[in-house]
Image (cartoon, rainbow, N blue to C red):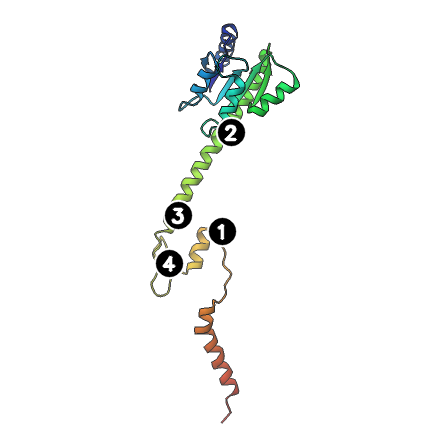
Amino acid sequence: MRVLIAEDDAVSRRLLEARLAKWGYEVLSTKDGTEAWACLQEPGSPQLAILDWMMPGLSGLDVCALARGNAATGSKHLILLTARDSRADVVSGLTAGASDYMTKPFDVEELRARVQVGQRIVELQTSLAERVRELEAALSHVKQLQGLLPICLYCKKIRNDKNYWQQVEAYIMERSAARFSHGICPDCYEKLVKPELEGIKNLAVAPQA
């Protein structure tokens, strides 16, 4: 798991780098919000970031807001790290788009736990996105098969993959959740059913020899 750090204070930045590396994370460090935002927009950039609030250029709060307004970065897990600890500040940070909020000086074990939570969330999002791609590919494949159905010109039966001819209803029901409710359309009623009913009626009233 790669983690982006945005921290303008050199001592704090090195401390974060050392801790994250010790925990097995690959660290990408930036010195201000502008550099961090540029990195987050690059293809393959880290999905998890720790952002200081007060930085030259763009603040951590600005980076959060920009990330949430961009489709390519909207799902990133952003931890806002700051000395500002009032309730109003926490609300502002989360409202701007931060996924989590930690105050300085931070507790090392708490930071580790929050980063681990962020990692689990990122992994779940990645797994879900992969499942969505698989389902979209499967749906596309099904649509392609439906577009290549050999159907009889006269009886409208469909030839399946075993070279047997099936009624349209049976073919579709075997391959989907669709079920059929049979009825009679107006054209078929006029052309087929009505003449048959009139024939039966005439037969019933015909005089007996």
Q: Quadrant of residue 99?
A: top right
Amino acid type, residue under disc 3 in the picture: Lys
Which residue is tagged 1?
A: 177
Precedes in sequence: disc 3 or disc 1: 3
- What is the distance, in whole Å, between disc 4 and disc 2 at their CAs? 42 Å
Reply above or below: 200 against 6.
Answer: below
Asked if disc 1 and disc 4 are in contact, CB closer than 8 Å, the reply is: no
- What is the distance, in whole Å, between disc 3 and disc 4 at their CAs? 16 Å
Is 93 in front, or is 182?
A: 93
**Residue drawn at point x = 49 percent, y = 24 percent:** 66
Q: Secondary structure at mark 4?
A: strand
Which residue is tagged 4?
A: 158
Q: Secondary structure at mark 3?
A: helix
Q: Position of residue 1 (x, y in %)?
A: 46, 20
Which residue is tagged 2?
A: 124
Precedes in sequence: disc 1 or disc 2: 2
Precedes in sequence: disc 2 or disc 3: 2
Is 166 in front, or is 205?
A: 205
Q: Position of residue 154 (x, y in %)?
A: 35, 65
Amino acid type, residue under disc 2 in the picture: Leu
Q: Which is closer to the viewer, label 4 or label 2?
A: 2
Residue 143: numbered disc: 3
Q: Residues within 10 Å of mark 3 (few under 14, many from 20)?
A: few
Of all residues, the one furthest to the right in this rendering is 87
Residue 119: numbered disc: none
